[in-house]
Image: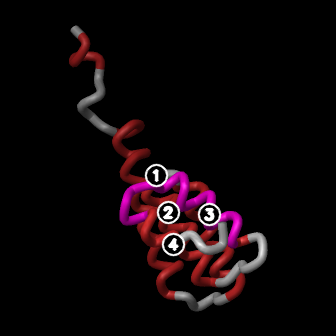
């Protein structure tokens, strides 16, 4: 599975296969590049918890990695918007259901 072109799988939107191939690669090579790729794949799948785990692993290796910091910030923004929509949206009051 090491020879699979993960970037090509991503381009073809075969994200489950790309992540499977990447996980196999990560068993022997937990490089920043591979961890960032894992974060990007899981972000595309909207698996934000998994994405955060990948990006935080990058920061363990390279604490100043700007890309990982940026992605973490983006995910936090997405999650805050989602939480605001579901829990603070004024349009979700009982008058809508009358």
The answer to whether residue 73 is above or below residue 78 is below
Among the two numbered marks 2 and 4 on one chain, the one whose residue lies closer to the N terminus: 4
The answer to whether residue 23 is above or below residue 85 is below
Name the foreground residue: 39 vs 24: 24
Label 4, label 1: how many angstroms apart (C-alpha)?
22 Å
Q: Which residue is mark 2?
A: 41
Q: Where on the picture, by quarter, is residue 25?
A: bottom right
* Proximity of marks 2 and 3: CB atoms separated by less than 8 Å: no
**Badge 3 local density, few (<14 within 10 Å), some, or many (20+)?**
some
Q: Name the front one of labels 3 and 1.
A: 3
Q: Name the front one of labels 2 and 1.
A: 2
Label 4, label 3: how many angstroms apart (C-alpha)?
9 Å
Under tag 3, what secondary structure?
helix
Q: Name the front one of labels 4 and 1.
A: 4
Q: Which mark is residue 26?
A: none
Label 2, label 1: how many angstroms apart (C-alpha)?
9 Å
Q: Name the front one of labels 2 and 3.
A: 3
Q: Residue at x 67, y 83 (%)?
A: 31
Q: Which residue is mark 1?
A: 46
* The stretch drawn in magenta includes residue 92: no
Relative to 33, is 23 on the left or the right?
Answer: right
| Image coordinates for residue 30, horizontal then vertical, percent | 71, 78
Name the foreground residue: 56 vs 98: 56
Among the two numbered marks 4 and 1 on one chain, the one whose residue lies closer to the N terminus: 4
Q: Which residue is mark 3?
A: 21
Among the two numbered marks 2 and 3 on one chain, the one whose residue lies closer to the N terminus: 3
Label 2, label 4: how many angstroms apart (C-alpha)?
14 Å
Q: Residue at x 45, y 63 (%)?
A: 9
- From which residue to which does the magenta span run? 10-25
Among the two numbered marks 3 and 1 on one chain, the one whose residue lies closer to the N terminus: 3
Q: Which residue is mark 4?
A: 5
């Amino acid at each position: 599975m090491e020879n699979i072109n993960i970037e090509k799988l991503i381009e073809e939107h075969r994200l489950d296969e790309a992540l499977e191939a990447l996980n196999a690669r990560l068993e022997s090579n937990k490089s920043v590049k591979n961890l960032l790729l894992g974060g990007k794949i899981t972000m595309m799948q909207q698996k934000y918890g998994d994405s955060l785990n990948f990006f935080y692993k990058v920061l363990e290796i390279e604490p100043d990695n700007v890309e990982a910091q940026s992605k973490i910030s983006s995910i936090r923004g997405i999650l805050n918007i989602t939480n605001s929509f579901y829990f603070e949206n004024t349009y979700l009051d009982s008058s809508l259901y009358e």
